[in-house]
Amino acid sequence: MSGRAPDFSLSLRVYYEDTDAAGIVYHANFLKFMERARTEWLRSLGFEQDAIAREHGIGFVVRSAELEFVRPARFNDELLATVRVERCGRASVDLTQNVLHADGTLLCGGKVRVGSVALKRMAAQAMPEPIYLGIRNA
Amino acid sequence: MSGRAPDFSLSLRVYYEDTDAAGIVYHANFLKFMERARTEWLRSLGFEQDAIAREHGIGFVVRSAELEFVRPARFNDELLATVRVERCGRASVDLTQNVLHADGTLLCGGKVRVGSVALKRMAAQAMPEPIYLGIRNA
Amino acid sequence: MSGRAPDFSLSLRVYYEDTDAAGIVYHANFLKFMERARTEWLRSLGFEQDAIAREHGIGFVVRSAELEFVRPARFNDELLATVRVERCGRASVDLTQNVLHADGTLLCGGKVRVGSVALKRMAAQAMPEPIYLGIRNA
Amino acid sequence: MSGRAPDFSLSLRVYYEDTDAAGIVYHANFLKFMERARTEWLRSLGFEQDAIAREHGIGFVVRSAELEFVRPARFNDELLATVRVERCGRASVDLTQNVLHADGTLLCGGKVRVGSVALKRMAAQAMPEPIYLGIRNA
């Protein structure tokens, strides 16, 4: 028993827009799926990024990403995109983000570092305290 | 002999990112090709949109588009995206924009209305006089 | 009293991937939203496009689209993308497809003609009878 | 003195389609820029991927990618996307791929592993000998 919370998970469908001429999901689009999952994960914690931008002038940007493309996803597949917090600092969060087929097969494994920035300057800035605490205590 | 200036034309290459699982360019991407051509056409007239935004707070948005998808484009094809002005008003321009295969075959025919907007309000605003004149006299 | 069935409607969320530097949904992406809605509409009628491709070698392509971009959509907005059949022929269907804000405001109005094609030849071919009837009787 | 050949480099322009509501290039699109550079790099070596697919049934897929997003790119920026071979095996190639501003500033650094696959099975298969030799001797 780990006591660890289960990963956050977003259900997704592969549409034509996501695929390429090799008949599979274009690799860059896995980053889109991971970003959708982060958005919904933040929402699940009570944080709306448009409100955060408006009220605090803070946004989140991807600092780095390590991606393993394990198996292809195809048109019409149902996918799950997950979010697990590995480390939460004041101005950056390390996440494990995977994209799985709905049957549980790992398609793309990712390690993503997201940083908070002052949107006007696009420079690192600590995230608002409630968000920091919300992520840490999630 | 029409006396008409030749259409502006931008050369493009189809990359994997542009295609879908049917093996052809995803239809929405023709709108991207047309927008790239508009950007390069404005640049050819001496107008840089980032400078226009910074100096005048003005941007261009697509008001309407009529698209006929005549033939498919495929991975690695060389394409031409054209711009021809049909009408230029103070706050909007009507363009014919086609995407052709490099061999001259019409792939997608478009009629696009572009409007100038005050970026802060996203509301129609006349374009700066030099741009208006530049487009009219092109 | 029209007796007409209500439009099919798909709920969507605007993610960062959908927006552009003007702070709004990039215009071409409305075509993506409309295509997602068509996919889910066909699914709601019992038709999975990957199965149709596999069993019949038939796919659907967009023949033409008329789009009016009425108001901008923004990051994090909840949208509805609709499908209404205006005419259904043997090898093409005319649809009205709108994208609305969840509050009911029309953002983008579309008239889309979709054609069925033999995927190998990318040439027009009548859709399988059950699909034709399924769409006509929807 | 390294004696090493200079990196292959592709010139790119940032269009509206590439940006997001934070006013910068959407992070996933750096992967698209890198893929365009790989396509043009292969072309510069004499290899057209559509011909390779047709004649050998072989395609290239991204196996893994490590990306550092160092600085943002903005609308209208001129960029360079580079390719340098770090290792070339029979069925995979390790590349360093960077995206730079035209002024030389590093924007995104990448390590990308590309694998050759039999397109029908999407399973690893050695690349055709001339391509292997072409890459090794480049």
Image: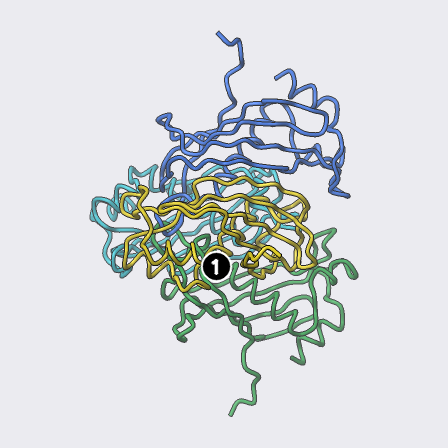
Chain colours: A yellow, B cyan, C green, D blue
Toward the top, the furthest residue is D1
Residue A32 in the image, given as x and y percentages of width and height: 51, 51
Can residue B138 be seen here? The reply is no
Residue C29 in the image, given as x and y percentages of width and height: 48, 57
Toward the bottom, the furthest residue is C1
Q: Chain of mark 1?
A: A
Toward the front, the furthest residue is A1
The one nearer the camera, B123 or B40, is: B123
Q: Is residue B87 left or right of residue B55?
A: right
The residue lying at 63 percent from left, 33 percent from top is: D114
The residue lying at 49 percent from left, 48 percent from top is: B98
Amino acid type of the residue that numbered disc 1 sits on in the rendered structure = Trp
Q: Is residue A69 left or right of residue D84?
A: right
The residue lying at 50 percent from left, 27 percent from top is: D82
Residue C115 in the image, given as x and y percentages of width and height: 64, 63
Residue D22 in the image, given as x and y percentages of width and height: 35, 49
Which residue is under mark 1? A41
Indicate the quadrant where residue C75 lies: bottom left
